[in-house]
Amino acid sequence: QVQLVESGGGLVQAGGSLRLSCAASGRTFSGYTMGWFRQAPGKEREFVAAIRRNGIITYSSYATSVKGRFTIFRDNAKNTVFLQMDSLKPEDTAVYYCAAGSVSDTFYSRTGAYDSWGQGTQVTVSS
């Protein structure tokens, strides 16, 4: 397991942008699949984005609701994964969680596939 600490959440108006960061401890960060999930009040935690590596190729995947607006990227030298969120909507309001694990290509969108989670950071988008 790795320890994950998120930051960068806050309050923003609709149409605005935020960048979330997730700093990870551990020497094998580059080998993990990293994911972002979110949970709104009264709803289940849902997949947002994931970034994984197969050999030398890096793959990014997104939930349909955020595709084209959010970008996930990582800096392996800094053991950090980022979620750039643009064109934010009120429905993006949630607690955002970073996750890490040795995840297969089939299961990257499933919460149960990850074994390390951060504490979460609140994102609130006002209309």
Image (cartoon, rainbow, N blue to C red):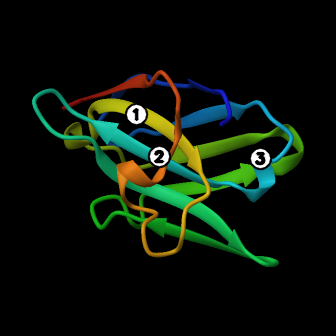
Q: Left or right? Give the position of 97 relative to 14.
A: right
| Residue type highlighted by circle 2 | Trp
State the CA–CA distance, disc 3 to disc 1. Answer: 20 Å
114 up-or-down from 51: above or below: above
Q: Which residue is mark 2?
A: 36
Q: Residue at x 46, y 63 (%)?
A: 108
Residue 51, position as x, y percentages in the image: 60, 61
Q: Which residue is mark 3?
A: 29
**Label ID, residue 26:** none
Please name which of the two marks, 3 or 1, marks the residue nearer to the observer. 3
Label 3 neighbourhood size at 10 Å, few (<14), some (14-19), many (20+)? many
State the CA–CA distance, disc 2 to disc 1. Answer: 7 Å
Q: Which residue is mark 1?
A: 96
| Residue type highlighted by circle 3 | Phe
Residue 106, position as x, y percentages in the image: 44, 75
| Marked residue nearer the N-terminal end (2 or 1) | 2
Q: Where, by quadrant of the figure, is residue 109 drawn?
A: bottom left
Mark 2 and mark 1 residues within 8 Å of each other at the beta carbon: yes
Q: Secondary structure at mark 2?
A: strand
Which sits in the foreground, 13 or 46? 46
Residue 36, position as x, y percentages in the image: 47, 46
Q: Left or right? Give the position of 92 relative to 17.
A: left
45 up-or-down from 118: above or below: below
Q: Residue at x 55, y 61 (%)?
A: 103
Q: Secondary structure at mark 3?
A: helix
Which sits in the foreground, 117 or 97? 117
Q: Where, by quadrant of the figure, is residue 104 drawn?
A: bottom right
Which sits in the foreground, 105 or 42? 105
